[in-house]
Amino acid sequence: MDKKSIYSGVQSCYATAEGMYVEGGKMDLAKAAAHLYLHMRDLERGYTYDHECRRIKMTPELFEARSKFLVKLCREQTGTDCDEVERLVNHVLKKYELPQWALEMAMKKIVKISRLF
């Protein structure tokens, strides 16, 4: 099975299982905030998904690893605001909360799928 994105894009595990996902494209501050919001959501409820969309435990260690990966991804994609992404990640890892300005940015990058039945 191909490894899927967990949080990003309409084909992601989150889109399939949760009915929402983070907009695709290069990592920037707003997308990092959206990912961090979903990471915290997963940590609070105790589970997340792996790259094969199987439900797994969201541990504090996995939360930290996924959060720090956002900075690495930003730098690999030659993002323009990676230093700000790193500062936001460090803030979240220290306080376990998004600042209000970051929460507002995050909500603009999370797409909710409406289903008609």
Image (cartoon, rainbow, N blue to C red):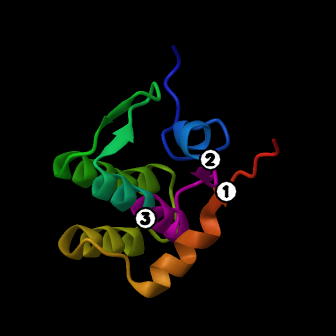
Q: Amino acid at mark 1?
A: Lys
Q: CA distance from mark 2 to mark 3?
A: 15 Å
Q: Which residues are magenta?
A: 19-37
- Label 2 or label 3, whichever lies nearer to me, is 2
Residue beneath disc 3:
37
Q: Is 117 located above or below residue 54 in the figure?
A: below
- Callout 3 environment at 10 Å: few (<14), some (14 to 19), or many (20+)? many
**Cβ atoms at labels 1 and 2 below 8 Å apart:** yes
- On the image, the x and y values in percent for residue 75 come to 42, 56
- On the image, the x and y values in percent for residue 40 come to 34, 61
Disc 1 element:
strand
On whether residue 35 falls in the magenta region, the answer is yes
**Which residue lies at the image location 48% right of the left edge and 86% below the top edge?**
101
On whether residue 1 falls in the magenta region, the answer is no
- Callout 2 environment at 10 Å: few (<14), some (14 to 19), or many (20+)? some
Q: Amino acid at mark 2?
A: Gly
Rendered image: mark on residue 19: 2
**Which residue lies at the image location 46% right of the left edge and 68% below the top edge?**
33
- Indicate which disc, 2 or 3, sits on the residue closer to the N terminus: 2
Rendered image: mark on residue 51: none
Q: CA distance from mark 3 to mark 1?
A: 14 Å
Residue beneath disc 1:
112
- Indicate which disc, 1 or 2, sits on the residue closer to the N terminus: 2
**Which residue lies at the image location 62% right of the left edge and 47% below the top edge?**
19
68 vs 81, nearest the viewer: 68
